[in-house]
Amino acid sequence: MTVPWVEALPWTVVLPLVGAALTPAVAARRPRVAGYWAWGVLLVTTALASGLVVELALRGPFSYALGGWAAPYGIELRFDHFSAWVLPLAALFVVIVPFSWRYLDHVMPAGRLPAFYALLLLNCGGMIGFCVTGDLFNLFVFTEVVALSSYALVAVGGRGLAAYAALKYLFIGAVSSLLMLFAVAQLFVMTGSLNMADVAARLAELGPGVPVMVAFAALAVSFMVKAAMFPVHVWLPDAHAIAPSPVSAVLSGMVVKIGIVGMLRVYQIYYGAGVLELGPFNQALVWLGAISIVMGAFFAVFQDDIKLMLAYSTISNIGYIVLGLGLASPYAVIGASVHVFNHALIKATLFLAAGAIIHQTGYRTLSDLRGVARSMPQTAAAMAVGAVSIVGLPPTAGFVCKWFIALGAFEANQAPFGFALVFGALFIFIYYIRMVNAFYFQQPVHAAVAEARDVPLSMRGPIVLLATLCLILGVLGGIPLSFVEPAVLDLLPAWGP
Amino acid sequence: MLLFGLDLDYVAVIVLFCVGLYMLVAKSNLLKKLLGLNVMETAVFAFIVTAGMIEGGDPPIMVEGTSAPFASPIPHAMVLTGIVVAVSVTAVALALIVQIHAHFGTIEVDELKELP
């Protein structure tokens, strides 16, 4: 008997959203139950998502018409190779939630836990919806679901400063969402359709023009802000550093990728329609990506706060992804699409390990945390694996993607950017070596650091698991690369089969 | 009616959007910034609503005596959803502003910057 996995597609989106709405009711008597409830919901979601990915691998992309209304009139959910990102996304949530169980005891009163887990589920559901929808307006709605829950998640742990960081994030995020809504409306006015594939087809009939370009520019800027590219990254460091560590992992690893997945969707529409010469735009992306790499690394070198350092390193890594997209050669785009996932994995490792260290010692700067590796060997080892991985040394998850992006630079005859990439990696190496040096080779300056015990199993387990995955994916890195290959070759018209 | 080669309603939308953007960027008071954001949202909603307009169109409700052409109902659905989203954003922002005020005693950005 074959399981109709297509039917599971809407449930992967609806389940976390409904789970989020039910969380306060489920945990009304005992707030702690919220954590176990969220974990259960996410486990089922992950199971459904893995079914979808298997179906995709066996039979290729498929669609589901919501409410039985066929596209282009109804809302279409479409599961293609870029949507497959929902599986690692949901799986990372499954790992991050158990870490939060103990971690949050010191961050917020128990009464806030149901709200926290509800927001986390909402965030997850929104991102899954964003990745699988085939409808432009739906894309906007899911962006806002993700964005709103992210603003609240930044503020949920603290008062004052956290609220201010969240508000700055909100203002910039809301403007970018408005630009997106405007672009969606513009495309609707021009084509009379909201279905992505249909819009692409109708744009092709309309031909080039200024409004087509305006809509593209608004979408591109909107997604760049969401991805925290260099000139519009200002909201990211404060928001990501001040949020509770599991939230930092979610924001830095996954929420910024909304911008990248969104960009891929825009590419699908515009490459498909072929109404716009994307060369100059891609060249701009390449430059902005290269600048993001260098500037993110530059700021990170001067940070003493480990979480702020990790936040700036996210800007660098988004730079790598955008550089890869802009190069628009198969190797580069494959590397970039896979780095969306690998960076999420590595950043989750690093942020959870950093959170564990802050949780046990109460300190968060490199100078205070000297010698922490002696008292927390496993967590520090995971952090070191994450550091090696994000620098991009073999045999870790970070290496394969950056290698592919560098190869792509040569493939696209833009060798200088290949060198820029290697140079950026060296820069990143400097600040991570500083961290490893402080943790391993310096004497503790605080008694709390010297006497700290390693974190309990429910927190150590996720960290060690993620660090192990960083290593495994370094060895088996070819699997995700070959998985996205057909989608990328479909996407790039000039290089297609 | 045309102005600078654009329909008048588009010009109004662009002006409204820029007014909102100016408030968001230039004002120091967080509440005024939020109001600016709301003005920008209104501008985008107005843009969508004008897209549904059809000269001499009937409301798209099937009762006796209505006939084609109908006004497009999709922009209305979009704007309604957009308004719901905008209200949620405003609510979250107001809650954050209340927290900031309770903690720092001010909602002026230039004063918040001077705080340690």
Image (cartoon, coloured by chain):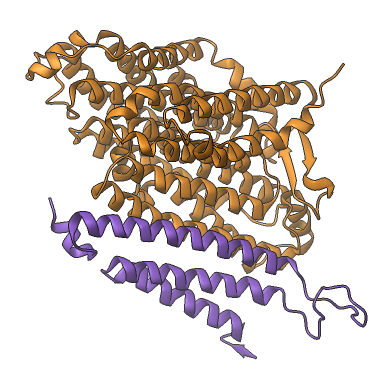
Chain colours: A orange, B purple
Left or right of B51: which side holds A111?
Answer: left
Left or right of A128: which side holds A75?
Answer: right
Name the quadrant containing residue A242.
top left
Compare residues A24 and A207 and report the one nearer the observer.
Answer: A24
Residue at 29 percent across and 38 percent down: it is A241
- Residue A414: image x %, image y %? 48, 37
Residue at 17 percent across and 32 percent down: it is A304
Residue at 28 percent across and 55 percent down: it is B99
Residue farthest along the bottom direction in this orientation = B1
Please, is residue B100 above or below residue A340 in the view?
below
Compare residues A408 and A171 and report the one nearer the observer.
Answer: A171
- Residue B111: image x %, image y %? 16, 63
Compare residues A495 and A79 and report the one nearer the observer.
Answer: A79
Residue A327: tell me if it is visible: no
- How many numbered circles are shown? 0
Left or right of A122: which side holds A109?
Answer: left
Please, is residue A261 above or below residue A461 in the view?
below
Compare residues A221 and A357 and report the one nearer the observer.
Answer: A357
Name the quadrant containing residue A494.
top right
Quadrant where the C terminus of chain A sits is top right
Residue farthest along the right direction in this orientation = B64
Name the quadrant containing residue B56.
bottom right
- Residue A47: image x %, image y %? 64, 22
Residue at 18 percent across and 21 percent down: it is A361
Quadrant where the N terminus of chain A sits is top right
Residue A487: tell me if it is visible: yes
Please, is residue B30 above or below residue A99 in the view?
below
- Residue A224: image x %, image y %? 47, 49
